[in-house]
Image: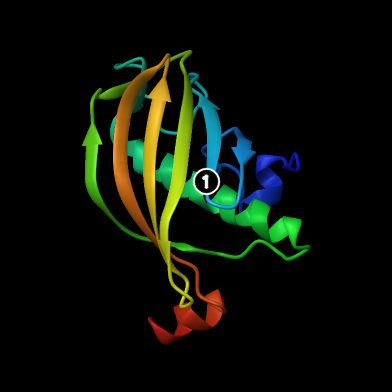
């Protein structure tokens, strides 16, 4: 595993980079982390944290970091991907609490040559499962052409 900064493996720019780091990856899975602070995007002082529905974007960005790291390993550029949808997004807590470090784990279940993939995802903190989902993503060969064709 190479040590990449999150900016190296995501096609996002600040302030829309929501996760802090890629902590581990291999051919089929990755782990990322984010520490919730009052400076976290989507932080809500009234609930002292980030609403757990933001977890789907943490998962999507973790999948993107996984794909970006694999691309970098092959000396390829990171490519834009698309969150197509989720199945069974379940939250076991309504808030990601301030000062908690979340571990976002993504595992590839299926990948087609077309660029469609399915990942099993989970977010944990302090050995507790906070939320889980199956996430469908699409990474076309030419993302900009795909966008133009589907406007």
Q: Is residue 79 above or below residue 89?
A: below
Q: SS at mark 1?
A: strand
Picture quadrant of residue 14: top right
Residue that appears at 59% across and 52% down: 27
- Of 70 and 82, nearer the camera is 70
Q: Could you tell me residue 2's position as x and y percent? A: 75, 43
Which residue is at 30% across, 32% downward? 131
Residue 59 is situated, as x and y percent measured from the top left of the image, at 42, 43
Q: Up-down: is 94 above or below 71?
A: above
Location of the C terminus (image quadrant): bottom left
Please give left or right for residue 7 compared with residue 151 in the image.
right
Residue 71 drawn at (x, y percent): 68, 60
- Residue found at the far right of this picture: 75
Percent across and percent down for residue 138 are: 43, 67
Residue at (30%, 22%) from the top-left corner?
95
| Side of 72 relative to 46 (left or right) | right
Displayed quadrant of residue 89: top left
Task: Left or right? Give the position of 94 relative to 81.
Answer: left
Task: Give the quadrant of residue 33.
Answer: top right
Check the image and report above or below for 100 versus 79.
above
Task: Give neighbour class at mark 1: few <14, some 14-19, many 20+ (Cα, 10 Å).
Answer: some
Residue occupying the point 38% across, 82% down: 150
Could you say which is closer to the camera, residue 112 or residue 11?
112
Residue that label 1 marks: 29
């Amino acid at each position: 595993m190479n040590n990449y900064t999150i900016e190296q493996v995501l096609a996002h720019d600040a302030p829309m980079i929501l996760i802090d780091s890629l902590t581990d990856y291999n051919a089929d899975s990755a782990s990322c982390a984010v520490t919730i602070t009052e400076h976290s995007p989507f932080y809500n002082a009234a609930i002292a944290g980030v609403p757990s529905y933001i977890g789907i974007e943490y998962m999507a960005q973790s999948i993107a970091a996984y794909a970006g790291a694999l691309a970098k390993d092959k000396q390829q550029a990171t490519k834009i991907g698309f969150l197509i949808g989720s199945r069974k997004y379940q939250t076991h807590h309504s808030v990601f609490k301030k000062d908690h470090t979340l571990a976002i784990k993504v595992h590839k279940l299926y990948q087609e040559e077309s660029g469609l993939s399915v990942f099993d995802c989970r977010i944990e903190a302090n050995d507790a499962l906070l939320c889980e989902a199956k996430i469908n993503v699409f990474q076309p060969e030419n993302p900009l052409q795909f966008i133009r064709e589907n406007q």
